[in-house]
Amino acid sequence: MTRVALAFSGGLDTTVCVPLLEEEYGYDDVIGVTVDVGQPAEEFDEAEETAEALGLDHYVVDARAEFAQLCLESVRANATYQGYPLGTALARPVIADAILEVAEEQDCTGIAHGCTGKGNDQLRFEAVWRSSDLEVIAPVRELGLTREWEKEYAAEKDLPVEGGSGGDWSIDTNIWSRSVEGDDLEDPNYVPSTEIYAWTEDPSDETEEIEISFENGYPVAVDGKEYEPVALIEHLNELAGSYGVGRTDMMEDRMLGLKVRENYEHPGATTLLNAHEALEGLVLTQEERQFKQQIDQQWSQKGYEGLIDAPLVSALESFIDETQQRVTGTVTIRFEGGQARPVARDSTFAAYSAEHASFDTETVGEIKQEDATGVAKYHGFQRRLANEAIAANADDEAVELATDGSGTGDDQ
């Protein structure tokens, strides 16, 4: 008997994949695997009900702790892609690993997903699965299915599916972010209503300040209360979301080259990333901060691609680990006008002296202000030389044009 494991959410795409895997690909048995990375409880209820209606053996894997830890690793790398925190991208390798493990335990010969051929997730899933001996199947991509065709097929087969928001939007949720796309949102000129948001309230005039504690670059406490990673992220999602923090409406460049309209909510992630960057600004030297921007960008790119286990990432994290040994301290965040703004920071590792920087002190330790005169004279010296040479050559050219008559402008 041939068996295939399907990444199963109970939504439209994965539900129609179940009969297609049997009818079009000839599998005798399909099992569904749902991986918990922080989705709402109703999504698991929907998946369970749909699986039961389909007669599908259904496995649920709790990967919240693993995913939350990866999210905190992304904080240490200040990881964003084109301005938004990586949520879906980081979740996919975690989900793929969990599904592969179930597939191997259940003696599957194939493993499948419901991704289209236009998105990023097909690449992220398959980057994990193609390291195994299982056949990788992508019915939606390989059969060229559209969402409208899937709706008609589901109605024809009387499949138990709603598709989320009546099938209008494609929504992906985990503890780090919530994404909404599809339907009217595909038009860049369409202004979405607030009904697309579930985690964030509209910003108001209310403000609140909280203190986030970090140890070695990891956030560990809020207002002195320690949290495990999952609980920490969930707490900040709720708190920051109530102030309208963490909405992104953007045109995103996908890996395949397509530009797409995406809407995201990420209140907790935004709060932690802003706080972490503020603390790094206090404790890291200028050279470390400048070089780490390159490291962070490379880490973020690999995270976006779903290649977080690449050898390059391991090398990048060696540098990140070294810098994060001093990223210990506290940051005060003010929720204000839909923003999570750092307003204070403190660390015993601060590469800063208030006395030295103050305009009210005469010296910088043993350095007198007048000692900066020599530096000021040298500053811009090369620029002055270059500009003088440019000006001198321009004058010579003007003289040459005048003497040979070519620049007189007189009619001949």
Image (tube, helix red, strand yellow):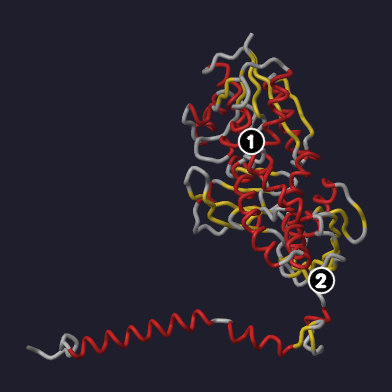
Q: Which residue sits at x=72%, y=47%?
A: 318
Point out residue 188 in the picture as x, y percentages from the top left corner. Answer: 50, 56
Q: Which residue sits at x=59%, y=31%?
A: 126
Return the residue nearer the eye: 321 or 154. 321
Please identify the quarter of the rendering in which residue 191 is found: bottom right
Q: In this view, does 225 lie to the left or right of 376?
A: right
Please identify the quarter of the rendering in which residue 408 is found: bottom left
Quadrant in which the C terminus appears: bottom left
The crowd level at tag 1 (other Cα within 10 Å; few <14, some 14-19, many 20+) is: some
The numbered disc on residue 162 is 1
Query: How far apart are the alpha carbons under marks 1 and 2?
Result: 47 Å
User: Residue at the right extreme?
Assistant: 225
Please report contact status of discs 1 and 2: CB closer than 8 Å, yes or no: no
Q: In this view, does 86 lie above or below 55?
A: below
Point out residue 209 in the picture as x, y percentages from the top left corner. Answer: 84, 68
Marks 1 and 2, the one that precedes in the sequence = 1
Q: Is residue 238 left or right of residue 28?
A: right
Assign a secondary structure to mark 2.
strand
Which residue has dot 2 on it?
A: 344
Foreground: disc 1 or disc 2: 2
The crowd level at tag 2 (other Cα within 10 Å; few <14, some 14-19, many 20+) is: some
User: Residue at the top extreme?
Assistant: 1
Assign a secondary structure to mark 1.
loop
Q: Is residue 256 above or below residue 193?
A: above
Point out residue 377 in the picture as x, y percentages from the top left corner. Answer: 59, 87
**Residue type at numbered disc 1:** Glu
Quadrant in which the N terminus appears: top right
Q: Which residue sits at x=85%, y=68%?
A: 346
**Residue type at numbered disc 2:** Ala
Q: Is residue 92 left or right of residue 60?
A: left
Return the residue nearer the eye: 112 or 51. 112
